[in-house]
Amino acid sequence: MTKKHKIAVIGGDGTGPEVVAEGLKVLKVVAKKHNFEYELKDFDFTGQRYLKTGKLVEDKDVEELKTYEAIYLGAVGDPAVKPGIIEHGVLLKLRFALDQYINLRPVILYPNVWTPVKDKGPEQIDFVVVRENTEGLYVGTGGYLKKGSPDEVATQVSVNTRKGVERCLRYAFEYTQKRNKRKQLTLVGKTNVLTYAWDLWERAFHEIGQKDFPGIKREYSHVDATCMWFVKNPEWFDVIVTDNMFGDIITDLGAMIQGGMGIAAGGNINPKGVSMFEPIGGSAPKYTGQNVINPLAAIGALQMLLENIGEDKAAADVEKGIRYACTQMKSMSAGKMGMSTTEVGDTVAKAI
């Protein structure tokens, strides 16, 4: 019996719809090859809609999205809208409402992709960051005292629950086991300064590892040292697990060492619910409509989506297509690829 998947599509702002179109082009080819069907629906959560209606993601939209297997997102961010409004009204709203408590970021350097890290190649840059996605500093807990005065005090509280920390760690251990490479999980934190939150993280890390995952080697690294090792010895890492804020920072550094935002994809994961997949690079509004933006990150996000919905063979074919396209391109940077956005999509599709 042919499988049929329900996928929600949020093209978003700027170049988002352009890169999503190339991902959907690849999806059409790979679905035909691997004999599965899919149903798509577009959701208009954009800056332009917000400017016209004042609305972004509403509660009724969340309820509808819960009926889909996955969400395919292009990008959010419109220069005509004050920074933070769309990000909070779409990305953070969906992450929290759909309890997408894992942010998954593969950091893979593909062949023929330039990296700023000297003397390192695909053999050395191949790891994954598991970032807790719904707690920490991003929950918005804090406030002001005497705002606007010379005595103003502002607090921003990092909220870490045992439940939230433990479920993130368990996902990371399980992912390390499934990845089956070095079987090494590195906890990245700041235990020497942030003693309360990171005491919880460290205790839970070792308790879970000792009890349930004795075959996984456990390592620890301070976040500042991790940034150094990403540049000096990226081959030291297999899977990394960390909190929301540190994960946000180190994954952007990871994107740079793997060749830039044009190749970096990520997933916001609810292992038992609806997950959302996106390119990391943002809406890149200055390139809108020019057919010069790199769609490989969006195609990589599609690959992750396919893995998430159980189409592993299709996902493997998409990765092969990405690897082939990398060998045909001059650069990962917009306008310097040696081919257009649509031609990159065509190259991946033909390789499949």
Image: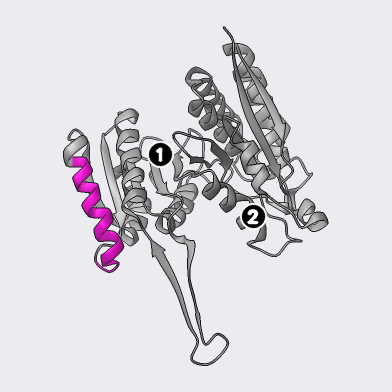
Question: What is the span of residues highlighted in magenta in the rendered image?
Answer: 192-209
> Mark number for residue 94?
none
Q: Quadrant of residue 296?
A: top right
Residue displayed at 41% across by 36% down = 122
Viewer-closest of 307 and 138: 138
**Which secondary structure class fits the magenta region best?**
helix
User: Mark 2 belongs to which amino acid?
Assistant: Gly
Where is residue 58 drawn, in percent x and y? Answer: 67, 49
> Mark number for residue 89?
2
* Mark 1 lies on residue: 121
**SS for callout 1:** loop
Viewer-closest of 118 and 301: 301
The span from disc 1 to disc 2 (Cα, nearest Å) is 39 Å
View extreme (top): residue: 1
Instruction: Give the crowd class for mark 2: few <14, some 14-19, many >=20 residues within 10 Å.
Output: some
Where is residue 215 drawn, in percent x and y? Answer: 19, 33
Instruction: Give the crowd class for mark 1: few <14, some 14-19, many >=20 residues within 10 Å.
Output: many
Quadrant, the C terminus: top right
Q: Are marks 1 and 2 in contact (CB under 8 Å)?
A: no
Quadrant, the N terminus: top right
Where is residue 49 drawn, in percent x and y? Answer: 78, 51
Residue displayed at 19% across by 46% down = 207
